[in-house]
Image (cartoon, grey):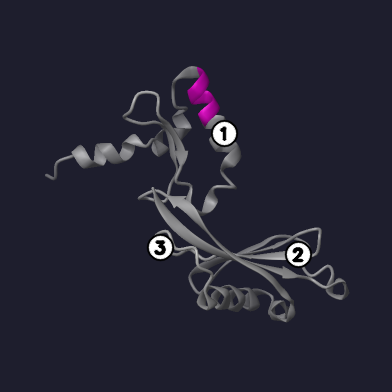
C-alpha cells in the first residue's frame, strides 16, 4: 500500500449567493477528477487532487490552482467565493488502485485498505465484506477479485 496525496479546498458560499449548488457535482476536467460538494452550513468542498508524492502533505499553490481552475470550468462563479480552508491528506493506494479485502498470507491478518480515491464511497460494502469474512471465515464471491493474495499469485507466475 502506498500513500496517494489529495488536496481539497473549502469555500464559503455567502447567503446572498445561496443556494449556490443544490447537489454534488462530479466531473472529469482536463483528464482529472473534480468534485463540488455543497454543505448545509454554506460550505462548498472542492476536491481533490491525486498526487504520487510519497508522504508529503504540503498544500501547494499548484494544487489550489488546479482545483479552482477545474471547478471554474464547471461553475464559473466559484472563483468569487471566499477560500476558507486548504488541506492535504493521504489515501491508501494498492498497486492496481483497487481495494485489498480479506485474508492475507499471514494467519489471522485481514486487510481492508487500498481504496485509493473511493474509501468513503466503499465503506458500506467494505464493512459488509469484512463482517462476512469475520463471521464465516470465507471471502464472499463478489469480493474475490480484491483479495490481497492476487499480488502474491502474480509474483509466482512464470513468463511463458
Q: Earlier in the sequence, mark 3 or mark 1?
A: 3
Q: Which residue is mark 1?
A: 127
Residue that mark 3 sits on: 52
Which quadrant does the C terminus fall into?
top left
Q: Which residues are magenta?
A: 130-135
Within 10 Å of disc 3 (Cα), the crowding (few <14, some 14-19, many 20+) is few
Q: Position of residue 108 (x, y in %)?
A: 40, 24
Q: Is residue 13 left or right of residue 135?
A: right
Q: Is mark 2 in CB contact (under 8 Å) with mark 1?
A: no
Q: Residue at x 57, y 74 (%)?
A: 64
Q: Residue reaching furthest top?
A: 136
Q: Which residue is mark 2?
A: 43
Q: Rate crowding at label 1 as few (under 14), some (14 to 19) or many (20 or more) other CA atoms within 10 Å.
A: few
Q: Main secondary structure of the magenta part?
A: helix
Q: Residue furthest left?
A: 160
Count of marks placed on residues: 3
* Magenta stretch holds residue 30: no
Residue 115 on image: x %, y %? 48, 47
Q: Taking 121 as reference, is 143 left or right? A: left
Q: Nearer the viewer, residue 96 or 62?
A: 62
The relative height of residue 66 versus residue 127 in the rendered view (above or below) is below
Residue 3 appears in which quarter of the rendering?
bottom left
Distance (Cα) linking label 2 and label 1? 29 Å
Give the CA distance from mark 3 to mark 1.
27 Å
- Residue at 54% x, 50% y is 118
Under tag 2, what secondary structure? Answer: strand
Q: Could you tell me which residue is drawn at 35 percent across and 23 percent down?
A: 107
Q: Where is residue 12? Give x, y as percent.
A: 76, 70
Which quadrant of the structure image shows residue 45?
bottom right
CA–CA distance between discs 2 and 3? 28 Å
Amino acid at each position: 500500500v502506498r500513500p496517494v496525496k489529495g488536496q481539497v479546498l473549502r469555500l464559503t458560499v455567502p447567503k446572498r449567493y445561496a443556494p449556490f449548488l443544490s447537489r454534488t457535482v462530479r466531473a472529469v476536467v482536463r483528464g482529472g477528477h473534480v468534485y463540488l460538494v455543497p454543505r448545509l452550513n454554506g460550505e462548498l468542498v472542492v476536491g481533490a487532487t491525486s498526487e504520487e508524492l510519497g508522504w508529503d502533505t504540503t498544500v501547494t499553490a499548484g494544487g489550489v490552482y488546479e482545483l479552482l481552475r477545474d471547478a471554474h470550468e464547471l461553475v464559473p462563479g466559484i472563483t468569487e467565493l471566499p477560500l476558507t480552508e486548504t488541506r492535504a491528506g493521504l489515501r491508501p493506494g494498492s498497486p492496481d488502485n483497487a481495494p485489498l479485502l480479506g485474508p492475507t498470507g499471514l494467519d489471522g491478518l485481514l486487510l481492508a485498505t487500498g481504496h485509493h480515491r473511493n474509501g468513503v464511497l466503499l465503506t458500506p460494502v467494505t464493512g459488509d465484506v469484512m463482517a462476512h469474512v469475520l463471521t464465516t471465515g470465507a471471502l464472499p464471491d463478489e469480493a474475490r477479485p480484491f483479495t490481497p493474495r492476487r499480488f502474491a499469485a502474480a509474483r509466482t507466475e512464470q513468463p511463458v
